[in-house]
Amino acid sequence: MQIANNTVVTIDYTLTDSSGEVLDSSEGSPGFAYLHGANNIIPGLENALSGHKAGDMLNVSVEPENAYGQRDEDKVIDVPRDRFENADSIEVGMHFHTQSEHGEVQVVRVVAVSDEAITIDGNHPLAGATLTFDVSVKAVREATPEELDHGHVHGPEGHHHD
């Protein structure tokens, strides 16, 4: 079966940046499964996998526009310390969920802490990066009606929402 919309795809992958540094890998796991066509993975990788089948291996380079976008320096802002509860315990590298002015939940990362402000970055950590995926397609199957309805893959034991 070929990878197409509404199929569940299981892959093994290694993700590297432009310098060859390994950023992520499915090594040691049963593989990564996703619902093709449901925006569960970055567009550049999903598009490259279309039409492939179990057993195929490919190397995919994905430009920022088809991954996590270009960095946007307007998403790096200084927030007065008094806007944070427990500001004294905030450290560089921490992540917070916040709500944008449009009501969307977003994750921000603390990139600097000073006496006056805490600098947060709303860019995805891989924004602006060209990513390379070494991928092996392990399995392709039709999605179940429940998976299609929910927009994501359910495990072998089924998936239960709270």
Image (tube, helix red, strand yellow):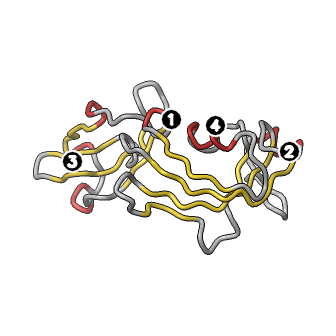
Disc on the earlier residue, 1 or 3: 1
Disc 1, SS? helix
The single residue placed furthest to the bottom in the displayed view is 28
Distance between the alpha carbons at the discs numbered 1 and 4: 9 Å
- How far apart are the alpha carbons under marks 2 and 4? 24 Å
Q: Nearer the viewer, residue 62 or 118?
A: 62
Relative height, residue 29 to residue 20 (above, below): below
Query: What mark, if any, has residue 121 been given in the picture?
Result: none
Q: Is mark 4 on a helix, strand or loop?
A: helix
Label 3 residue SS: strand
Amino acid beneath label 2: Glu
Q: Find the distance from the CA under tag 4 to the CA under tag 3.
A: 38 Å
Identify residue for label 2. 146
Which residue is tagged 3?
A: 118
Q: Do the residues labelled 1 and 4 touch (CB within 8 Å)?
A: yes
Q: Which amino acid does label 1 sit on?
A: Asn
Which amino acid type is marked by label 3? Ile
User: Residue 77 location, x and y as percent?
Assistant: 24, 37
Alpha carbon separation for disc pair 3 and 2:
43 Å
